[in-house]
Amino acid sequence: KGCLSGWKKFGCSCYYISTEKKTWNESREDCQGRGADLVVINSLEEHAFIKALNYRAWIGLTDLEVKRTWRWVDGTPLTTSYWNWMEPNNYGGNEHCVQLYLIDSDPVKAWNDAPCSHDYQWICERLSA
Ligand code: 2F8
Ligand code: CA
């Protein structure tokens, strides 16, 4: 059916939601080991799908390379965003990785910048067969 067992299909992609919690870098390495990468969210439809998967999880967005310049792990710049109210705020001055974080009932807003070294669940994306 196009996706490995345990993965969920949406559009042309398959998505894996971890049960473990890891740092952003370790999460990304886990995805790469699965022939995937951290999820890149390209549309409101995909964003809505991702929102329904988890309450709080790393996604493939970071400004580790150029501070306050958000880039997806596939190298594309951020053109459409779904930040939570008041985010990204670089709270404590060390927030360079982005997580899905459903802190309110807004149907669209859902992203928070957080410290990359913190452990959270994560979501991988790979092309479906
Ligand atoms: O109030 C928003 C703020 O909430 C937390 O900090 C207190 C978040 N920290 C973590 O998720 C680690 C901030 O990123 C967030 O901006
Ligand atoms: Ca934040």
Image: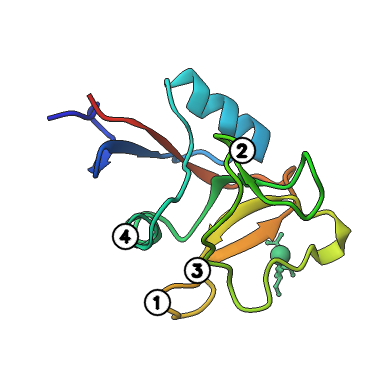
Kind of residue sitting beneath label 4? Glu
Q: Is residue 58 left or right of residue 88?
A: left
Q: Horizontal and vertical percent for residue 56?
A: 52, 57
The residue indicated by pointer 4 is: 45
Q: Residue at x 27, y 34 (%)?
A: 6
Q: Which mark is residue 102?
A: 3
Q: Horizontal and vertical percent for residue 57?
A: 52, 51
From the image, which quarter does the N terminus lie in? top left
Q: Residues within 10 Å of mark 3 (few under 14, many from 20)?
A: many
Mark 1 touches mark 4? (CB < 8 Å): no
Q: Give residue 68's quadrant in the image.
A: bottom right
Task: Say which label, 4 or 2, has the lower sequence index.
Answer: 2
The residue indicated by pointer 1 is: 107
How far is disc 1 from disc 3 in space, using C-alphas? Answer: 10 Å
Q: Which mark is residue 27?
A: none
How far is disc 1 from disc 4 in space, using C-alphas? Answer: 12 Å
Task: Say which label, 4 or 3, has the lower sequence index.
Answer: 4
Q: Residue furthest left?
A: 1
Q: Which mark is residue 22?
A: 2
